[in-house]
Amino acid sequence: MRRSIARGLCWLAAALICGSAVSADKLVVGSKRFTESYILGEIVRQTLEDAGVAAEHKQGLGNTGILEQALATGSVDIYPEYTGTIVRELLKKEGNPTLSELNAWLAPRGLKAAVPLGFNNTYALAMRESQAKALGMTRISDLLKPQAAPLRLGLSHEFLARADGWPALKAAYKLPMQAASGIDHGIAYDAIAAKRVDVIDIYATDAKVGRFALRVLQDDLGFFPKYDAVLLMRGSVDPAPLRRLEGRIDEKAMIGLNAQVELDGLSFAEVARRFVAGRALKENKPAQSFSQRLFAEDFSRLAMQHLLLVFGSLLIAVAIGVPLGIVAWRWPRSAGPLLGLTGILQTVPSLALLAFLIALVGGIGLLPAVLALFLYALLPIVRNTHAGLNNVSEEMGQAALSLGLTPRQCLRHVQLPLSMPTLMAGVKTAAVINVGTATMAAFIGAGGFGERIVAGLAVNDTGAMLSGALPSAVLALLVQFLFDRIERSLLRGRVKAPLSSQR
């Protein structure tokens, strides 16, 4: 068992090293978790590859804070950003500086902004046209009117927390209304269409504004800064291969690109491929069936990443959790603190744990994701190891000792084998839990089937979400079946042993 664990840990370390080595030879392009950022990230990647520069796209990396950390640690080299976000969110400054002024502010951080793409994607608030007309709402200041009091806000999570978001907007306009819990940007349009909310935050280039017949409220106080799209990159990155994108995308073109994904159902990669190749925006392509989306060209890559996340973290959890369970059994006074600590780890929200580990390890991707899954897997393994050893009768241990075995030999050859069915049940539980939890790793660029779920959520595409959720569910069932077979074989061996000893 020890040899197999050691081999597994060596394999995992080699995978981590190889993954890092591959990434080190490429420019890593990041993107946030909304349609436009996915598309622009793909355009940047494909443009780099057309210029002969190796690149990979880590898509859907959560919010600005995660990408800021990724740039700082070198996990990401470049990603599409907006000048207003850079000024207020990253630099904590005010105003609308020129690009050269902005770069003077960014230089001490080892960053630079380059390649202005040609459009301004400002934040805005929007309402249903029919409701806005009935209430006489044309400006954000109109939300101060008495008839606006019952309006329900459906604001995105990031907008609720940003320096240029709801708290500052509310203070600038002296708005009395309170925001409810955050809602994902991709779902907000369906929520306002279904009349579950009345006011949402939008981006000026969102393709669904016209489709859902929304009225964009005028920012009459000029609160929002300019959000000119640029590429934010590390200071060492050469922007020359990307100069061909400069000024090529205006607001109308960006709305058209977003519409191809959100309204026509094309993939981010296909939309980017058409743009880079200079093909017409309105060129039609038959929609993919669900089976084609399920077994798309990225299926094997995502499956391998998901398996690495699950079994890599499981190997580490077994290597550490089993000894901890033995400690808790051997010294009963330590059982309470050990089981309590591993239990507390289970209560930490996955995104909060991932954010903490990103700061701890100084990067995004596979390593913090594996560490998070390892921590979640500890409780069932430690608890079942402790319970399994407690279930072995003291007489068995005493009999082994009386035959001349040392306590360590007794543990290795008698007590651990007898407790193995219970221990393996804990490993099975940890593995099945990790299959589902591993989908969260997509938020920090660790891959797996969560990539499809996160991308589908960004555009409210049920088919895309199912193409990631279904293989994850099937993988969980396969893992459970595998461990059920192992448990049954262990139980059969345990039953046969006493019968053979009677002969």
Image (cartoon, grey):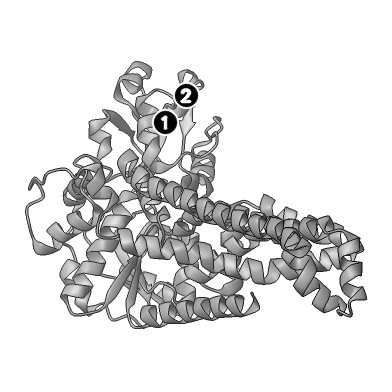
Looking at the picture, does residue 5 appear above or below residue 371? below
Relative placement, left or right, of 302 versus 408 is left
Q: Total of numbered circles in the picture? A: 2
Asked which quadrant contains residue 386, the reply is bottom right
- Seen from the viewer's position, the closer of residues 177 and 59 is 59
Report x, y in % for residue 240.
22, 79
Residue 151: assigned label: 2
Question: Is any atom of residue 90 visible in this view?
Answer: no
Residue at (31%, 58%) from the top-left corner? 299
Looking at the picture, does residue 462 appear above or below residue 41? above
Kind of residue at disc 2: Leu
Residue at (20%, 48%) from the top-left corner? 266
Report x, y in % for residue 448.
41, 59
- Seen from the viewer's position, the closer of residues 49 and 220 is 49
Q: Which element carries disc 2, helix, strand or loop?
A: loop
Q: Are marks 2 and 1 in contact (CB under 8 Å)?
A: yes
Report x, y in % for residue 66.
49, 62
- Seen from the viewer's position, the closer of residues 467 and 204 is 467
- Seen from the viewer's position, the closer of residues 275 and 22 is 22
Mark-to-mark CA distance, 2 and 1: 7 Å
Report x, y in % for residue 120.
27, 53
Q: Earlier in the sequence, mark 2 or mark 1?
A: 2
Asked which quadrant contains residue 48, the reply is bottom left
Looking at the picture, does residue 45 appear above or below residue 143? below
The N terminus lies in quadrant: bottom right
Question: Is any atom of residue 39 visible in this view?
Answer: yes
Mark 1 packing: few (<14 Cα in 10 Å), some, or many (20+)? many
Residue tagged by mark 1? 199
